[in-house]
Image: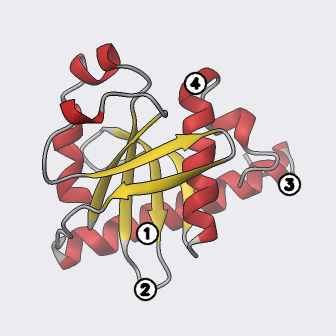
């Protein structure tokens, strides 16, 4: 994922750096990751990770306190994951983040989980739909690498 796809799907700047670090860390833990995945409610998450056992994790990247305070849509992500994290850079005031979420400190090269979230349980039908969306999105993005004739 991090090779040829990053320019198309991972944003530039600090947000992109944090997303890359998060994806590298989750991949090291055995997860597959997709950046900028659209959910069934029309929202788009920064990073979705799929674990070997089917665990679905959403990571919302926050680049600054202003970014965090201006964006309350993260609560709409909770029904679409088993666990939810905020990813922030070193030096971010983590005390402002809400209780009951995971926290990842990231940079361009990796990330560390500093707080584990509680695990949520999705409805089986939503889990199936989300796993299919994850798989179809990943497949479509891989086809783009093979050439424009697949678009």
Q: In screen coordinates, is 9 left or right of 119? A: right
Residue pointed to by mark 3: 146
Q: Gap in Å between the C-alphas at discs 4 and 3? A: 29 Å
State how far apart marks 2 and 4 are (Cα): 31 Å
Whole-Å distance between the Cαs marked 3 and 1? Answer: 21 Å
Residue at 43 percent across and 69 percent down: it is: 132
Of circles 1 and 2, the one toward us is: 2
Which residue is under mark 4?
14
Q: Which residue is mark 2?
A: 53
Q: Are marks 4 and 1 in contact (CB under 8 Å)?
A: no
Q: Is residue 114 left or right of residue 97?
A: right
Task: Please identify, in this view, whether the residue under mark 2 or under mark 4 is nearer the observer.
Answer: 4
Between disc 2 and disc 4, whose residue precedes?
Answer: 4
Which of the two marks, 4 or 3, is nearer to us in this view?
A: 4
Q: Please indicate whether residue 11 sits to the left or right of residue 56 in the image.
A: right
In three-dimensional space, the C-alpha distance between marks 4 and 1, rounded to whole angstroms, equals 30 Å
Residue located beneath label 1 in the image = 132
**Dot 2: within a 10 Å radius of its alpha carbon, few (fewer than 14), some, or many (20 or more) residues?**
few
Please provide percent x and percent y for residue 98: 15, 40
Name the element at disc 1.
Answer: helix
Of mark 4 and mark 3, the one earlier in the sequence is 4
Q: Residue at x 64, y 56 (%)?
A: 24
């Amino acid at each position: 994922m991090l090779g040829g796809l990053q320019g198309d799907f991972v944003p530039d700047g600090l947000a992109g750096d944090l997303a890359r670090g998060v994806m590298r860390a989750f991949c090291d833990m055995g997860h597959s990751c997709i950046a900028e995945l659209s959910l069934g409610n029309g929202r788009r998450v920064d990073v979705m990770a799929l674990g070997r056992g089917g665990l679905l994790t959403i990571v919302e990247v926050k680049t600054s306190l202003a970014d965090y305070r201006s964006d309350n849509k993260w609560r709409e992500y909770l029904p679409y994951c088993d666990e939810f994290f905020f990813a922030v850079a070193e030096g971010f005031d983590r005390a402002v983040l809400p209780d009951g979420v995971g926290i990842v400190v990231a940079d361009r090269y990796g990330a560390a989980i500093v707080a584990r979230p509680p695990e949520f349980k999705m409805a089986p039908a939503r889990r199936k739909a989300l796993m299919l969306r994850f798989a179809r999105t990943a497949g479509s993005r891989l086809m783009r690498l093979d050439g424009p004739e697949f678009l």
